[in-house]
Amino acid sequence: MVSIAGPRPIETGTYRARRRGTNRALSNGKVISAVLLDVDGTLVDSNDAHAHAWVSAFAEAGVNVDIDHVRRCIGMGGDKLMPEVSNLHEDDPLGKKIAARRGEIFLKEWIPRLKPQRNADRLLAALKDRGFTLVAASSAKRKELKPLLEIAGGAWLLDDQTSSDDAEESKPEPDIIHAALEKAGVQPGEAIMIGDTPYDVEAASRAGVATIAFRCGGWNDEQLRGAFDIYDGPWDLLARINTSPLAGDGSRPNAKPSAPKRPAATP
C-alpha cells in the first residue's frame, strides 16, 4: 500500500504506561476478566485501506481531501472523520452518498486484499485459553466487521462483538466501549481494551477502561500516551503475554503459544 504520513497526537485519558517487567494487576486492583478488542489496525492491517477508500469516495463526489489528514483520522467513526477532513457531515445528502460509496469501495476493492496482523489469531487463542471473555469493540459498520473478523482468523473465538451500529456515537466517544462492556457482562475495572489508535485509548479511558495499545496501526508511543502498556502488535504481546497485564491466573511461564484450532464442524 502507499506509504502515508504518521497520524497526529491526540490528548487521551489518565492511564499511563507501566513497564516493570513483572506480572501485574491494574492499579485499581481488580481482576481483569474481559478483553475488548479493536479490529481495524489491531487485528487486521487495514488502516491504509480505509484511508484510500475514503479519499476515493470523496474524489468521486468532487471533493478533494488530503490523504494524510484522512489517515490521521482513521480509528474515528465516519461521522467524526467526515467533518474533520471536509466541511461535510455524514447526515448531509452529499455526506450520506460519500459514506455509502466509501463502504462499497472498501468492501469491493480493499477487503479482498487485506491481511491479518501477524499472530492475531494466536493472540486471540492465547487470551481465550486464559479464560478471558473476548468482545470486539469496533467503529466499523456491522457489514464490514464480519469479513474483517474472518480475515483476523479468530472470529469463532470471540464471545460477542459490537460495531458502530450498536452505538449512538463512534470513537473517540465511549459509546462502543460501553456497549462492549454490557455484552461482556463486566464493569469497566474488570476489562481491558486492546487497540491501535489514540481514539481507542481515549474512548476506553472515558469509559473507565485501561488500554493496551499496538504500534502496528501507525502511531508511535507519544501519540498513544495514556495507554497502560504499548506493544508492537499481536505478535509482540503474544511473545510477552506472561509478563503483561493479561498473564492471568492461567499463565504458564514455560508454555509456547499454540496455533488456534477451530472446533470440529457439526454434521
Image (tube, rainbow, N blue to C red):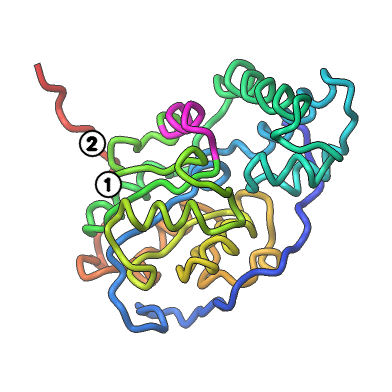
| Residue 52 x/y as whole percent | 74, 30
Please tell me which residue is depicted at 27% across the width and 54% down the height of the picture.
133
Outermost residue, left side:
267
Residue 153, image x and y in percent? 38, 34
Looking at the image, residue 133 sits to the left or right of residue 191; the answer is: left
Q: Which percent across, then down, holds residue 205?
A: 53, 69
Observer-side mark, 1 or 2, equals: 2
Range of magenta residues: 140-149
Q: Check disc 1 and report the residue beneath it.
A: 258
Circle 2 sits on which residue? Answer: 261
Dividing the picture into quarters, in which one does residue 159 lie?
top left
Bin the neighbour count of mark 1 within 10 Å (Cα to Cα): few under 14, some 14-19, many 20 and up. few
Depicted 5 relative to depicted 96: above or below: below
SS state under label 1? loop
* Quadrant, the N terminus: top right
Q: Is residue 158 above or below residue 266?
A: below
